Image (cartoon, rainbow, N blue to C red):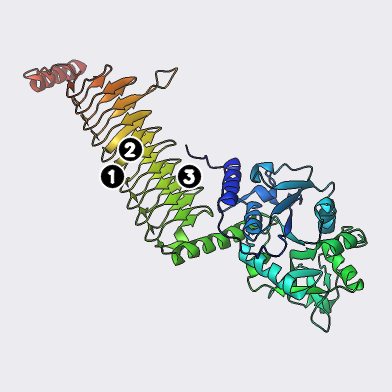
Amino acid sequence: MFAKHGLAQARNRLTLERRHSGPRLYDLRVSAPTVLIMAAGEGTRMRSRLPKVLHPVCGRPMVGWPILAARDAGAERVAVIVSPERDISSGLPDDVETVVQPQPDGTGGAVRAAGELIEGDGPVVVLSGDHPLISAEVISSLLEAHRQSGAAATVMTTELDDPGDYGRIVRDDAGDVARIVETKQPTDATPEEIAIREVNTGTYVFEAAPLRDALARIANDNSAGEYYLGDVLPLLREAGLRVVAHNESDSGVNLGVNDRVDLALVSAEARRRILERHMRDGVTIVDPAATWIDADVEIEPDARIEPGCSLRGATRVGREAVVGPHSTVTDSTIGAGASVVHSYLLDCELLDGCIVGPFTYLRPETRLGEGVKAGAFVEIKKSRIGRDSKVPHLSYVGDAEIGEDANLGAGTITANYDGFRKHRTVIGDHVRIGVDTQLVAPVNVGDAAYTGAGSVITSDVPPGALGITRPKQENIEGYTEKRAREEANEEGNDS
């Protein structure tokens, strides 16, 4: 019923969001852009068997962030440029193309590999798969600046206090981009160029025809022996075409991921933005520093998220629900006005007004109807519980169907596994299960029936009946005095 948490499921969510996304930000009266996302880097500094761009950032594969941003910005065609050595298909939605870059020969080589997609006269946007903080708004702003300038290429730039080894933007007297100077090697740039604070973010818009022509003429005569996409720009200028810069104030567009330190920094910033968005949309997050919310989580206004909570995957939280403190909710739905305290929920559904916890574990394919209570130290798995029913405490319910207004006493267990197969327990409406009852499936308890405390129910209980299996109580008079005499005799014999 609900998707499991993982890369394949994240891919499905990307596809689903693509189909149901809101209005696009880019004016489609202009030619819709083609977007190329560079994701062929080897990612050796991650020291991971998992390809770098598949590492999750707030629950979404890193490469999924620019894909969704591109779609929301109006792209009709999105292609990811990949390495032949790394399979990243599990993190891509089904409607995204892939292009193989045969060898790791730089950003210019990556875009060259996608040459067949650079067709017609529309704009071509180039993004980086390891820059997850790019947004649809930023891409749309870049496209609009490009359209208004009439340039052959527009480079997205930002200014940094410490530019590090990012490529520097060298402008001409008119303010257009003269060239991008790489600084990875000591001999690549002069001291004056290294002092420039405006840097290349690795995001571009090109007109297709001049880009095709310039790509064929770039060279790799640099210290790294790579083809730099930035080297296209001087060739465009030599042809009498303009190259302009669009300076983006959001420095997050330049936060790329090379290693796990970068991944943590980017994830922290993404998480901060997610929390801020929810709070501005009317959600109370009591302690943002102690709250983790994934990118695809949806929360309605007036919900309250207490400290220590982690909301992951495709979780949905309804209006005026309270989650936490210290709850983990993954790929689950929590209805309006529900309460989840100090509990763990995985792949389950709670309708409006449910009360869960503390210390409750709701496992996959569990569905709680309106007003259901699952109390302290309760585990429920693959079960449906009807409206206003209660499993107050210390119980295990697995593979069960429970009707409306039923009450399961403390210590109730559905014994659903016989060592070979799972079996279902069916409990009707208005049933009262006595404390410490074991229901050995398959078994049915009819409407308005009762079970006696301490019973082991192995046969069906008819509607309105009492099922009871405990033996008759027997009292042994004088037992305590007898035991005391026996103990005294044993001690005397030992001495």
Residue 485 relative to residue 187: left or right: left
Image position, residue 94 (x, y; %): 66, 43
The residue pinned by badge 3 equals: 331
- Location of residue 174 with respect to 260 vertically, above or below: below
Observer-nearest of 423 and 236: 236
**Disc nearer the start of the sequence (2/1):** 1
State the CA–CA distance, disc 2 to disc 3. Answer: 20 Å
Relative side of 236 to 250, left or right: right
Amino acid, disc 3: Asp
Mark 1: amino acid: Gly
Left or right of 310 in this view: 430: left
Vertical comparison of 347 with 179: above or below: above
**Residue type highlighted by circle 2:** Val
* Pick the front one: 210 or 425: 210
Q: Quadrant of the C terminus?
A: top left
Task: Name the residue: 75% across, 74% down.
Answer: 245
Q: Which mark is residue 480?
A: none
Q: Are there few (<14), some (14-19), or many (20+) residues within 10 Å of tag 3?
A: many
**Pointer 2: what residue?**
378
User: Which one is nearer the viewer's eye here, 371 or 105?
Assistant: 371
State the SS at label 3. Answer: loop
Task: Mark 2 and mark 3 in contact? Answer it, CB < 8 Å.
Answer: no
Give the image location of residue 476, x and y in percent. 9, 17
As drawn, the label of residue 371 is 1
Query: Does dot 2 land on a helix, a strand or a loop?
Result: strand
Mark 1 crowdedness (10 Å alpha carbons): few <14, some 14-19, many ≥20:
many
Q: Are marks 3 and 1 in contact (CB under 8 Å)?
A: no
